[in-house]
């Protein structure tokens, strides 16, 4: 049962939501999706010039520049807002200051961080303060971190524990944004060039070479080479609330090569919504003993589909359709996972396979 006051989806009509990093690649998708859902975005971020250019595309929207190291400006950016969505990476730099501003304003905070350490920091640093403030902080409410967590949670169903969770990303390619590249550089520096995995119920940093394996994706992807141990934010979100000591993620070899290649181009829009031609299939397998449960999600453009994930989260929080009222919470713990996943159609199609 959801906590909080029972309301209808129309309660969010005209609600103001600040989008920090609104002019970024993902931020633009979030602004557009908020408007489609009846919200009024406030355009905010560090670069006043870029905000001005975005405002030309959206006449009438409030524009509030806010350097991340200026608490007063951040307070003004969030003033009167019902919630804030942080789309500005690297989140190692932006998450804490924007969360602090959200706590001062006592409004929900949602971000789209894929950075493993930044997400872990959010859970470690703000859990008690969010509970005390009576509001929710939702990190990694995005393609990486949020979607996998919802899928694993839905696949678990009535299980209270499992031995392993495997999340295989079947991307047909990956042209990274500059934000993705910047986040990757920050994460690499924080790890001292090492890699990270979640095993035996804890994070482990290592220098092992990552193996190339074969993964049996469902049709139409089929058998593909994947990089084992290509660790994504799911290793933070899933163990934050589920008793699974082994959480492993995999990436198709061509996508892994594309995201690390120095000469990979940025995503190119091919339709009127600004989406690229990239397609994905996410295959989740949860195992307990000899029994496996599966969830499969498919769609197009990993950056574009982050917007319906983040905006659906905001809508459910503001209309009281949550399983917890306060704290730092991952998507699978905060929301009723199967219903949330169904609500993502047609942007993301999800199938649960007992």
Image: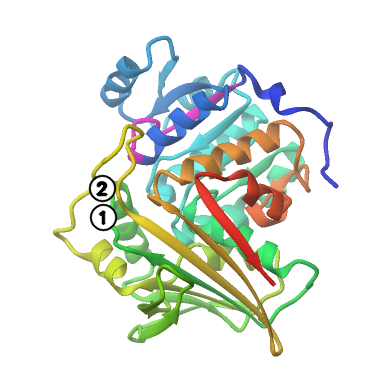
Q: Are marks 1 and 2 in contact (CB under 8 Å)?
A: yes
Residue drawn at x 16%, y 61% is 262
Above or below, 47 relative to 250: above
Residue drawn at x 68%, y 63% is 153
Give the Cα distance between marks 1 and 2: 5 Å
| Image spot of residue 139 (x, y percent) | 56, 50
- The picture quadrant where one finds residue 158 is bottom right
- The picture quadrant where one finds residue 344 is top right
Above or below, 186 relative to 287: above
- Residue of label 1: 175
Q: Is residue 342 magenta?
A: no
Question: Dot 2, how many residues are within 10 Å of its Cα: few (below 14), some (14-19), or many (20+)?
Answer: some
**Left or right of 4: which side holds 342?**
left
| Image spot of residue 296 (x, y percent) | 55, 65
Residue drawn at x 69%, y 43% is 130
Q: Quadrant of the C terminus?
A: bottom right
- Residue of label 2: 267
Which badge, 1 or 2, comes first in the chain's sequence? Answer: 1
Q: Is residue 22 magenta?
A: yes
Residues rendered magenta in the picture: 16-25
Question: Dot 1, how many residues are within 10 Å of its Cα: few (below 14), some (14-19), or many (20+)?
Answer: many
**Left or right of 60: which side holds 83?**
right
Assign a secondary structure to mark 1: loop
User: How many marks can you see?
Assistant: 2
| Image spot of residue 282 (x, y percent) | 49, 64
Q: Is residue 256 visible?
A: yes
Which label is found at residue 41? none
Residue drawn at x 50%, y 45% is 347
* Picture colour scheme: rainbow
Assign a secondary structure to mark 2: loop
């Amino acid at each position: 049962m959801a906590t909080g006051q029972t309301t209808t989806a129309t309660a969010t009509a005209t609600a103001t939501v600040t989008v920090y990093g609104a002019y970024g690649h993902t931020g633009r998708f979030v602004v557009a999706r908020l408007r489609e859902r009846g919200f009024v975005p406030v355009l905010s971020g560090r670069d006043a010039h870029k905000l001005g250019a975005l405002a030309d595309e959206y006449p009438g929207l409030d524009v509030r520049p806010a350097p991340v190291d200026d608490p007063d400006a951040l307070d003004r950016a969030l003033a009167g807002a019902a919630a804030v969505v942080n789309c500005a990476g690297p989140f190692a730099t932006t998450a804490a200051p924007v969360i602090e501003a959200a706590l001062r304003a006592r409004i929900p905070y949602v971000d789209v961080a894929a950075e493993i350490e930044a997400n872990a920091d959010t859970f470690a640093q703000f859990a008690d303060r969010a509970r005390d403030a009576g509001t929710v902080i939702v990190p990694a409410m995005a393609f990486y971190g949020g979607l996998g967590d919802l899928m694993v949670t839905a696949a678990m169903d009535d299980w209270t524990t499992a031995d392993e969770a495997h999340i295989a990303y079947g991307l047909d390619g990956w042209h990274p944004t500059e934000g993705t590249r910047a986040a990757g550089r920050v994460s690499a520096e924080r790890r001292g060039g090492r890699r990270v995995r979640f095993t035996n119920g804890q994070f482990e940093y290592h220098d092992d070479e990552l193996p190339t394996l074969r993964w049996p994706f469902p049709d139409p992807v089929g058998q593909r080479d994947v990089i084992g141990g290509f660790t994504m934010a799911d290793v933070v979100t899933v163990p934050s609330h589920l008793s699974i000591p082994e959480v492993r993620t995999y990436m198709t070899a061509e996508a892994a090569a594309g995201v690390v290649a120095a000469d990979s181009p940025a995503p190119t829009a091919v339709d009127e919504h600004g989406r690229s031609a990239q397609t994905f299939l996410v295959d989740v397998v949860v195992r307990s003993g000899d029994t496996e449960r599966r969830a499969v999600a498919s769609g197009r453009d990993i950056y574009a589909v982050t917007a319906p994930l983040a905006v659906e989260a905001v809508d459910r929080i503001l209309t009281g359709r949550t399983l917890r009222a306060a704290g730092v919470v991952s998507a699978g713990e905060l929301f009723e996972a199967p219903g949330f996943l169904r609500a993502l159609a047609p942007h993301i199609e999800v199938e649960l396979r007992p």
